[in-house]
Amino acid sequence: MTKIYNKKSEQLKRRELRNNPTYAEKILWLSLRNRQIHGVRFLRQFSIFGFVVDFYSPEVRLAIEVDGISHRGKEEYDSERQKIIESLFIKVIRYTDEQVIEQTEKVIDSIKEIVGERLKSKSKK
């Protein structure tokens, strides 16, 4: 079986992204780290099918992307990438840098809500 998560070939790319986060990623990570949201673990710069997502929780199969300047003009690519990731039953949610920086509490509240819903649906199975 082909490994689709955190392939060795993506290791340097993931490390580089973790060592050089954007300001918005730093802000969001402060609220995601150490299982602060419903006790769920989030990982930074996790690769799925060769695509690196900003944050990922394997427990609730949730990927969080923070779209900054590097995503401008790449909307079509991001959309295709998201479809591929979602085909693995992983929910992808996106926020802009501006949303994370200017509306941090609102962003965190929406993540809490989504994580809570995914935990509930997981427990019903």
Image (cartoon, helix red, strand yellow):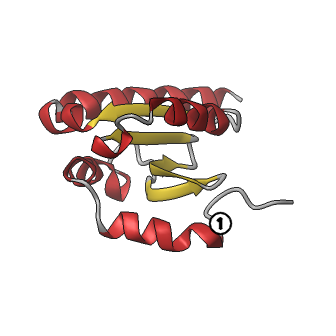
Residue 69 appears at what percent x and percent y?
A: 28, 42
Q: Quadrant of the N terminus?
A: bottom right
Residue 84 appears at what percent x and percent y?
A: 66, 37
Q: Secondary structure at mark 1?
A: loop
Q: In terms of depth relative to the viewer, which is nearer, 95 or 29? A: 95
Is 44 placed above or below 125 here?
A: below
At 22% across and 27% down in the image, what residue appears? 106
Q: Given the image, on which type of amino acid does mark 1 rest?
A: Lys
Specify whether 104 is left or right of 18.
left
Specify whether 25 is left or right of 94.
left
Pointer 1 local density, CA inside 10 Å: few below 14, some 14–19, many at least 20: some
* Residue 56 can be seen in this image: yes
Residue 29 appears at what percent x and percent y?
A: 29, 53
Total numbered labels placed on residues in the image: 1
Q: Residue furthest front?
A: 73
Is 21 placed above or below 85 here?
A: below
Q: In terms of depth relative to the viewer, which is nearer, 76 or 28? A: 76
At 81% across and 60% down in the image, what residue appears? 2
At 66% across and 52% down in the image, what residue appears? 49
Specify whether 27 is left or right of 111.
left
Mark 1 = which residue? 7
At 41% across and 48% down in the image, what residue appears? 39
Q: In terms of depth relative to the viewer, which is nearer, 20 or 60? A: 20
Q: Residue furthest right?
A: 1
Residue 14 appears at what percent x and percent y?
A: 47, 65
Is 28 placed above or below 116 here?
A: below
* Residue 119 can be seen in this image: no
Q: Quadrant of the C terminus?
A: top right
Q: Quadrant of residue 16?
A: bottom left
